Amino acid sequence: MITPNIWSGGQLFAFSALDGDSFCSDDFVGYLCADKIGIRFETKIKRELILVNLKRKDLPKFKTVASDIITLSTKANDINIIYANRHLIVGNTAGDSYFTVTTEGEHTVEKLKDCNIQNTNNGEFTGILKRGNKFAFAFGHSKEAVINLLNKGIEADIPRLIKQRLKIYELNFLSEDNEYSMLYSKCLSVMKSQLYSPEGRLKKIWSTPDRLPHKYLWLWDSVFHSVGYRNINHSLAEDLILDIFYAQKENGFIPHMAGVEVESYVTQPPVIGWGAYLVYEKSQNKEFLKEVSQKNKKFLLWCANNRKKGEKELYTWFTEDYSLCRCGESGMDNSPRFDKDTVLEAIDFSCFMANETRIMAKIAGILEDAENEAFFNEWYEKIKNDINQKLWSEKDGFYFDFDINNNKLQKIWTVASFLPILAGICDSNQTEKLIRHLTDKTRFYTEMPIPSVSKQDSNYSSDMWRGPVWLNYNYMVIKGLENCGYSSLATEIAQKTVRSLNYWYKKSGTVFEYYDPDNLSSPATLDRKGAVFEPYDFNIRYQSVRDYGWSNTICLDLLHNELKRDAKN
């Protein structure tokens, strides 16, 4: 059995809904410290659980560094840190080492028999109990609740818990001689950490982009999470997509972010039908397709009624007067495409709609629904024709956004312009010209393809959507290339993508939100709407997020499918 074993600051440590109740509204989640063997917990006032008094002769070797279990091997014994439930961590130490708790800000410590209770006077309590070489660390909203958890935790069956937490790696793995076997186990670890239990209007297990700093359900993140889970748990993959519809309004609108009681006022790229079809390829569950089809049709009609400015079947994103994120709705928050205060008939939105109508027609065919099959095929052809008539530049051999205010193409070269490949928009001439740009080493075929902005574009930088590589776009381009007969190029991009992820995982212990196209700079050093802050603290400024959800789920899917690795289930 192979488990992730690299310690680095910023990695998530969280209790998964796969093992019991884990609620967003009352979460207790942490991330690994960079400068010590410790975990920093994101309560109202920060706490750290720290291992101290390790003797030189007992310096540990990490055996497992996963999202809910950490095992260090010493000469004396293994040291284990395990989530027992959502508010309780248990384990054991070795030799003279022990765990202690440090708490920031104003607080009191009450010393009881075998344990200390930390009261931060804000309705939150933690406590640590030590007995022999065992310990329990608990969180709660009263001293009594914490003491109750500590007493249960100190009696926990550590070997049984270890076996339970490692089961996912026993059931899902790559062969030990596979160069990506450790990366694969890392992806599993992060995927598990993303899951919350049903809560309020969210009736099924649901996922969040990264638990910290994001904590709610996000539309297209949930879809990309499902494509990873389709390889190991069909039912859960379906639930992650169906969860999206719990926040859908009667008029069809779906917010880009939703929680139990909160939601946004913008939407996000329509990719639900496409994701559902990818899950169906594995599950063959027509009832799932039927439910998605009915609800997704309402969403697509809402987009048609609310995100078009003219007669053409071309779609415009909602933008805001915020320079660092003018178009969060597109998912490309700070892309240079949105730097100017203008209205764009967007190549990406239009292609997403084309791809969705194309897939919805295919789904209707599977469901033997001739009326919807004809409806979506007709809609698809309209979008396809309008994209090619208005957003294609024959001179440049490239697609661009159309600037409605200035009545011309806005020629900013971004990865969004390869989405016509995914949507089946291009004829053979257009495809060849796009492939020429995609394989041009001075533009998009970088050491780690595909940069979000061409290296030749004057807007190219290391800041988020202004140059760095994002796994979701790589995945969509890879899928498009496969569909139009460029399978060898698709495999080559998949190989270079996974090779880069593996390189940075081995150096940093994490899988990041986005990457340097030249593969020279650590993703931790790349800008994110401004300069990064060290040490890692997303409360001060976000960086390329560590243990980012879809980077892991997409990597796992590539290992299962595009790279044809020896994955076993």
Image: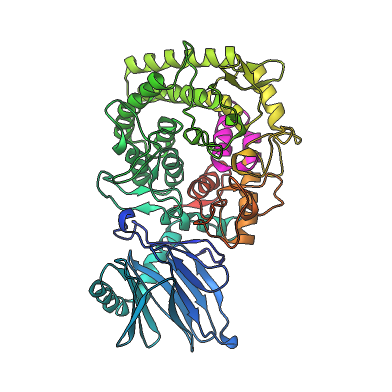
Q: Quadrant of residue 465?
A: top right
Q: Residue at x 63, y 44 (%)?
A: 463
Establish if 255 lies above or below 27.
Answer: above
Establish if 556 lies above or below 427.
Answer: below
Establish if 222 lies above or below 392.
Answer: below
Q: Quadrant of residue 61?
A: bottom right
The furthest residue to the front:
106
Q: Specify whether residue 426 is in view.
A: yes
Q: Residue 470 or 147: which is nearer the viewer?
A: 147
Q: Which residue is drawn at 50% across and 18% down?
A: 314
In the displayed structure image, the side of residue 285 where residue 1 appears, left or right: right
Residue 348 within the segment the image draws in magenta: no
In the displayed structure image, the side of residue 198 where residue 306 appears, left or right: right
Q: How far across and down, in percent of the image, does residue 253 sit?
A: 34, 29
Q: How far across and down, in percent of the image, does residue 254 sit?
A: 35, 33
Residue 487 within the segment the image draws in magenta: yes
Q: Residue 558 or 33: which is nearer the viewer?
A: 33
Q: Which residue is drawn at 37% across and 17% down?
A: 373
Number of numbered discs visible in the structure rendering: 0
The furthest residue to the right:
442
In the displayed structure image, the side of residue 105 where residue 476 appears, left or right: right
Please name the colour scheme applied to the rendered image. rainbow
Q: Specify whether residue 179 is in view.
A: no
Q: How far across and down, in percent of the image, does residue 386 sit?
A: 53, 13
Q: Please report the bounds of the magenta region as a residue range.
A: 467-493
Q: How far across and down, in percent of the image, does residue 197 sit?
A: 30, 53
Establish if 326 lies above or below 564.
Answer: above
Q: Quadrant of residue 152?
A: bottom left
Most common secondary structure along the magenta stretch: helix
